[in-house]
Image (cartoon, helix red, strand yellow):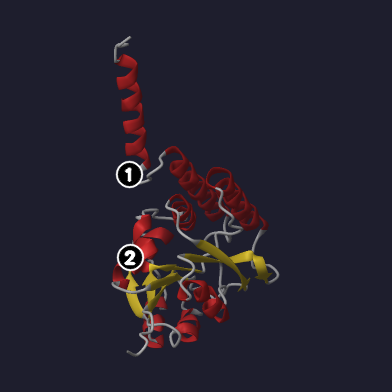
């Protein structure tokens, strides 16, 4: 019986990446089954350029990195492996085979491309990004014994493992939610060093003070939610309500002794 190649689909959230998205798609499309570019409300020709390069383009008009990823997964349908990467040219497509290797050999469920343990071009990561990544990884080590060094956007995961995570984070908490839930559900995780390049254009996160603050708040808020609520299956507000209701019930219950 001939060997069946795994179905690998790459999801690329993109916002105003007209200048580079065509090159990104062209650099990986021959290595995978399908490239899905999720247009997260672009006002330029990102969608048209990606489509011309050979990608399946999905519209995700409500702003949010996590929302774009969720819409991309929904469009992916059945597959063996999901790969996530950014559309700004910062992730090096030459790292894709190495990223996939631990999954293809059957030893790992999820692989994170670590920029901090790899090669980072001058100016590609700001001091605030380095600090935020290190803090998040430190907290994952404290609470869940995780050994991550980065929240790198370039990552791969089996579809079966992804479905176990029940991902929900709509914004910048997406990457850390995936890693935390992988730890909590006992997935086999690995990191590989990757090359991180200077992006084309202005970053939507590190390029503005507002972006840095919001990203930090979402990331830390996601970790806090996962610490407080083990399953992480409901919204933060509904979990808080349930928590206080349970406490109120226990306090009002008469002592049986």
Name the residue that disc number 2 marks: 71
Q: Position of residue 150 (x, y in %)?
A: 59, 59
Judge left or right: residue 206 versus residue 77: right
Asked whether the residues under the numbered discs 1 and 2 touch, taking CB atoms below 8 Å apart as contact, a structural biologist would say no
Which comes before the other along the chain, label 1 or label 2? Answer: 2
Q: Quadrant of residue 133?
A: bottom right
- Residue lying furthest bottom in this view? 2
In this view, 224 is above or below 209: above
In this view, 130 is above or below 221: below
For label 2, the crowd category at 10 Å Cα-Cα, with few meaning under 14, some 14 to 19 and many 20 or more, is some
Measure how far apart labels 1 and 2 are at the Cα level: 19 Å
- Give the mark toward the camera: 1 or 2: 1
Tag of residue 26:
none
The residue tagged with tag 2: helix, strand or loop? helix
Q: Position of residue 225 (x, y in %)?
A: 44, 42
- Residue lying furthest front in this view? 1
Name the residue that disc number 1 marks: 234
Judge left or right: residue 39 versus residue 183: left
Judge left or right: residue 47 versus residue 194: left
In this view, 161 is above or below 104: above
The residue tagged with tag 1: helix, strand or loop? loop
For label 1, the crowd category at 10 Å Cα-Cα, with few meaning under 14, some 14 to 19 and many 20 or more, is few
The answer to whether residue 60 shows anywhere in this view is: no
The answer to whether residue 70 shows anywhere in this view is: yes
Assign the N terminus to one quadrant of the image. Answer: bottom left
Q: Position of residue 221 (x, y in %)?
A: 48, 44
Q: Nearer the viewer, residue 155 or 164?
A: 164
Q: Position of residue 45 (x, y in %)?
A: 41, 78
Judge left or right: residue 23 versus residue 242: right
Please name the residue shown 32% across and 44% down the image. Answer: 234
Please name the residue shown 45% across and 65% down the image. Answer: 109
């Amino acid at each position: 019986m001939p060997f069946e190649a795994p179905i690998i689909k790459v999801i690329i959230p993109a916002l105003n990446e007209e200048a580079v998205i065509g090159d990104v798609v062209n650099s990986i499309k021959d290595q995978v089954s399908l490239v899905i570019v999720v247009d997260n409300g672009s006002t330029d020709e990102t969608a048209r350029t990606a489509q011309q390069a050979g990608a399946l383009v999905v519209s995700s008009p409500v702003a949010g990195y996590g929302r774009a990823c969720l819409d991309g997964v929904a469009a992916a349908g059945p597959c063996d492996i999901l790969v996530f990467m950014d559309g700004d040219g910062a992730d090096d497509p030459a790292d894709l085979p190495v990223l996939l290797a631990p999954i293809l050999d059957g030893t790992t469920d999820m692989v994170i491309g670590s920029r901090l343990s790899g090669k980072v071009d001058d100016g590609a990561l700001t001091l605030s990004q380095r600090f935020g990544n290190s803090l998040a990884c430190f907290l994952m080590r404290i609470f869940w014994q995780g050994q991550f060094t980065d929240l790198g956007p370039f990552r791969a995961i089996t579809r079966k493992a992804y479905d176990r995570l029940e991902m929900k984070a709509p914004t910048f908490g997406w990457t850390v939610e995936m890693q935390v839930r992988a730890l909590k559900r006992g997935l086999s995780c690995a990191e590989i060093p990757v090359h991180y390049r200077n992006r084309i254009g202005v970053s939507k996160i590190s390029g503005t003070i507002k972006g840095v603050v919001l990203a930090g708040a979402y990331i830390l808020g996601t970790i806090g939610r996962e610490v407080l609520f083990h399953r992480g299956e409901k919204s933060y507000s509904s979990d808080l309500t349930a928590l206080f209701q349970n406490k109120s019930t226990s306090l009002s219950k008469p002592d049986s002794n």
